[in-house]
Structures are given as C-alpha cells and as structure tokens.
Amino acid sequence: MFACVATIKAKEGKAEEMGAALKALAAVANEKEEGLILYKPYQRKDEPGTFIMMEQYVDEDAFKVHGKYPEFKEAAALVGACIDGAPEAVLLNEV
C-alpha cells in the first residue's frame, strides 16, 4: 500500500469554508477513484486553520492518477480559494 499525509493551511478566516471544501473533495474522490482506500480530512484541535488529509491507496500507481478527472478538479477549486500556500505532503510506503 501507498499513503500520503498532507498538511493544508486555510487562509485567515477561511477555516470553516476550508473544512466544507475538503469534505466535498473527499466525497468526490471516495466515489470516483479506483484504487483509493482512504481519503479523509481532519482538522487540528489546537490549530483550527490547519487540516490534515489522510490518503491511502492500493499502490503508488493509484496515487499517480488521483484527481485527474473533471469532478475532482471542480471540487479542488473550492479548496484552492481557501488555501494559504502549498500543502505539505509526506509520501509513505507500507512496511
């Protein structure tokens, strides 16, 4: 299995909107993507403007095609309107 943990920061005053956008993005990904096991957003309790996206795929190839379809790109635009800088991603291989 292959995983990604992404840290996403919301612009000031956009945390609630970011949470809703990430939930919508996750709904699209979970419905459409083959090879996706987990795609779930979390919000830090100690930093409400910081979100962690937990992603798990059957393999790295499934990760490489992640988000390459119109519905995902539309939902991702909502996230893009709220994000403060580029996400920080950590890529992981299962041991």
Image (cartoon, grey):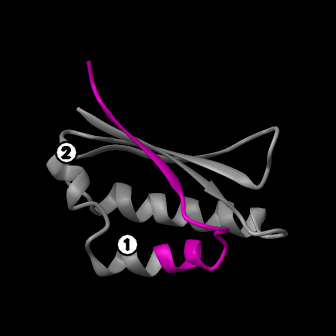
Which is nearer the eye, 36 or 1?
1
Question: Which comes sooner in the sequence, label 2 or label 1?
Answer: 2
Picture quarter with the N terminus: top left
Q: Give the mark toward the camera: 2 or 1.
A: 2
Asked where in the image residue 65 lies, by quadrant, the reply is: bottom left
Instruction: Check the image and name the residue furthest to the left.
Output: 61
Residue pointed to by mark 2: 60
Which is nearer the eye, 82 or 86?
86
- Residue 95 x %, y %: 26, 18
Question: Secondary structure under badge 1?
Answer: helix
Asked where in the image residue 12 lies, by quadrant, the reply is: bottom right
Instruction: Check the image and name the residue furthest to the top.
Output: 95
- 84 w.r.t. 60: above or below: below
- 81 w.r.t. 55: above or below: below
Q: Does 17 appear in magenta?
A: no
Q: Which residue is pictured at 26% across the width and 58% down the height?
A: 33
Q: Does 81 appear in magenta?
A: yes
Question: Secondary structure under badge 2?
Answer: helix
Q: Is residue 69 left or right of residue 40?
A: left
- Residue type beneath disc 1: Phe
**Circle 2 residues within 10 Å: few <14, some 14–19, many ≥20:** some
Residue pointed to by mark 1: 72
On residue 37, which mark appears?
A: none
- Residue type beneath disc 2: Glu
- Residue 27 x %, y %: 45, 60
**Circle 1 residues within 10 Å: few <14, some 14–19, many ≥20:** some
Q: Is residue 59 left or right of residue 41?
A: left
Which is nearer the eye, 3 or 85?
85
- Residue 83 x %, y %: 64, 69
Bounds of the magenta span?
76-95
Asked where in the image residue 17 lies, by quadrant, the reply is: bottom right
Q: Which residue is pictured at 20% across the width and 39% down the height?
A: 58
